[in-house]
Image (cartoon, coloured by chain):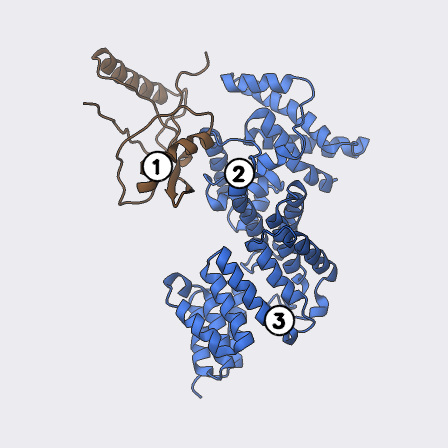
Amino acid sequence: MRYLFLLNRTEDGLPQPGTPEAQAQFSGYREANEAMAAAGVLVDCAPLAPQSSSTTLRVRDEELLITDGPAAEIKEQLGGYTIVRCADLDEALKWAATIPAAREASIEIRPIIDVEGPS
Amino acid sequence: MEETLRASWWSSVAALTRLTGDLGRAEDAVQEACAAALVRWRADGVPATPTGWLVGVARHKAIDAMRREGRRAEKEAAAMRDLGASAPADAGGGDDELGLIFLCCHPALDPVVRVALTLRAVCGLTTREVAAAFLVPEATMAKRLTRAKAKIRDAAIPFRSPDDAERGRRLPAVLKVVYLVFTQGHMATGGDDLVRGSLCDTAVALARRLDRLLPDEPEVAGLLALLLLTDARRAARTDERGDLVLLEDQDRSRWDGSLIADGEALLARAFRRGRPGPYQLQAAIAACHSGAPTADATDWRQIALLYDELIRVEPSPVHEANRAVAVAMSEGPTAGLVILDALGHDPQLARWPQLHIARADLLRRSGRPEDAYEAYGRALQLEPPPAERRFIEARRAELGSPRS
């Protein structure tokens, strides 16, 4: 059985990078992730860019309806997730449009933050 | 000199966006280069290729900024290397300019922000000027623009000139933004007259540039024609007090004949391509008005037919309401009222003051002053902008008091 955890936070909730608060938060996440990895339960994890950077896609009558922000439709609920690696948003939109959820409801496209940083 | 800077802004920001891969950074660098230009050009004269000069200086400013921040993320290091390389290869053919405007009008951005972003990044308005156009405080507009640029960066919205298929899909969104810049200036939504007038000029200039970049797109020429034909009436559409003057009451000798001729020529060129669209059709309707020597000579039958065609390519209740007025003018007020009354059942359209103004006018023409008085009252309840409110009140006063 696999479970997706949706880690909620307030939109202004991220502390400034480099501050003690940010370091405390970071080590909190690292400890939890390392413990889950050590126990062999962790599949993948990553932070997400703020909701203000998300895009919602719907496909209706073969037409792509793209809007800024998350889906505001209360009759929809999260039903699954897909992670893709694409060059840019246009490529991600193209792939998202092929998934049935885009026709039946909507797909929110939210950038994942790359935590690996500079090598 | 300011004019030269403004004319070079679009290409300069576009080139820097390509070079740095970041719109915000590009704007900042070009802004700094413009400040430097004001000093240097005043002393040495304007260079032969102002845009080349600006891009060269802005490139160094961008490198300085990246050094100052000391951030060396992989992507930025790559951008630095590109920036450090010799003369930037110009993509040519307006690809950078198109890339920038299609970026600012990307469907993944909020529609209102697309307009603001285009005014700033493409037209070179300052944040203060953009804020004035939207009647919001400068800090509010600055926050919106910053957020939009953050989204472009975080979501990796690409900077590139779209290929033919994609351009066809996304061009309407770009044209809509140009049109909204114009209506923001054209409509009496309050605010400074000077700001509004210059917004109309900005929109016309933007449409002209776009028409040069995309000469084979008839809808671009159609939009430019629509803006010119509408703008030709600017001097006649308000009186000394700033109140709106109805098309039929306007002094047609004050219409700008050269703008009308330009618009008509553009429209003829666009229609020859045989791909009519909403802007060409709206321009054709505007041309019906500008071609009539007097209001009575207007060919309303032709206008009603053009609205039929417009509704076919772009269904919209607003077009339906306008068609109803044209039908009323050619066939009599009763025929128009039948259409308007049916439209009034649409709750969204019922909240549109123009519908009630049109109804009131047709009711007055059919000899029903009491009903007209009531319809004007309903338009007033919908809190129209001040100039429109004064217009409605004046029209209602002409009816005399109700039920007397």
Q: Is mark 1 on a helix, strand or loop?
A: strand
Q: What element carries label 2?
A: helix
Of B146 and B360, the residue lying toward us: B360
Q: Mark 2 highlights which residue? A: B165
Residue B121: image x %, image y %? Answer: 59, 38
Which residue is situated farthest in the bottom direction here?
B404
- Image mark 2: chain: B
Quarter occupied by residue B248:
bottom right
Q: Nearer the viewer, mark 2 or mark 3?
A: 2
Q: Are marks 2 and 1 on the same chain?
A: no
Q: Mark 3 highlights which residue? A: B299
Quarter occupied by residue B26:
top right
Q: Quadrant of the N terminus of chain B?
A: top right
C-alpha separation, residue under disc 2 versus residue under disc 1: 23 Å
Color used for chain A?
A: brown
Color used for chain B?
A: blue
Up-down relation of residue B182 to residue B214 (above or below): below
What residue is shown at x 60% (from left), y 16% (from top)? B81
Q: Mark 1 highlights which residue? A: A107
What residue is shown at x 44% (from left), y 64% (from top)? B352
C-alpha separation, residue under disc 3 versus residue under disc 1: 49 Å
- Image mark 3: chain: B
Residue A17: image x %, image y %? Answer: 41, 22
What residue is shown at x 40% (from left), y 16% (from top)? A116
Q: Which amino acid does label 3 sit on?
A: Asp
